[in-house]
Image (tube, rainbow, N blue to C red):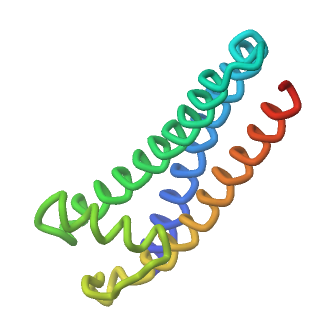
Amino acid sequence: MLDNILIGFGMAGLSCTVVTAFIIIAARWLNRHAPRFLAGSAMGPLFLSIVGVVFWLLLALGVTVALWAGLFLRLDLFTGWEPALYFTTVTITTLGYGDIILPAEHRLLTGFLATNGLILFSMSTAFLIEFLRRVLDVR
């Protein structure tokens, strides 16, 4: 059980680090380029910047899903990428269909993954809201 707790904390920390790095990269880019990019009243740059940030955050979350799925493959809990990615996606979003579950000796990781998902989606949402607030203030 202790090994699953350590693995869960480690993966949650790694996932938060990845999303934080994506957010920092986006914030630096936006601080540097947004005022010039969003100058004027054209809707195109505003639209592109919002879509770009959303896709950037989805990429960050996708990387974390791939990391967790890779862990599950490394632990031989799944036979291929598709079921590992499916389980990870369903769990990290806290949807939790329950059609695929981890063996009893590793099921504690499911809770860490779901909790990690709540944190990651909260971080992403907070950044997106702050981004929209700043972009709309610039306009």
- Give the residue drawn at x 18%, y 57%: 81
**Screen quadrant of the C terminus:** top right
Residue 13 in picture, x, y percent from top left: 58, 54
Q: Which of 106 and 134 is in front in this view?
A: 134
Q: In the displayed structure, does residue 105 sit left or right of residue 29?
A: left
Q: In the displayed structure, does residue 64 sit left or right of residue 118?
A: left
Residue 23 in picture, x, y percent from top left: 64, 37
Residue 20 in picture, x, y percent from top left: 63, 41
Q: Residue furthest top?
A: 36
Q: Which of 109 and 65 is in front in this view?
A: 65
Quarter where residue 88 is shown: bottom left
- Give the residue drawn at x 37%, y 58%: 68
**Screen quadrant of the N terminus:** bottom left
- Give the residue drawn at x 60%, y 67%: 118
Q: Residue furthest right?
A: 137
- Give the residue drawn at x 67%, y 54%: 125
Residue 115 in picture, x, y percent from top left: 57, 72
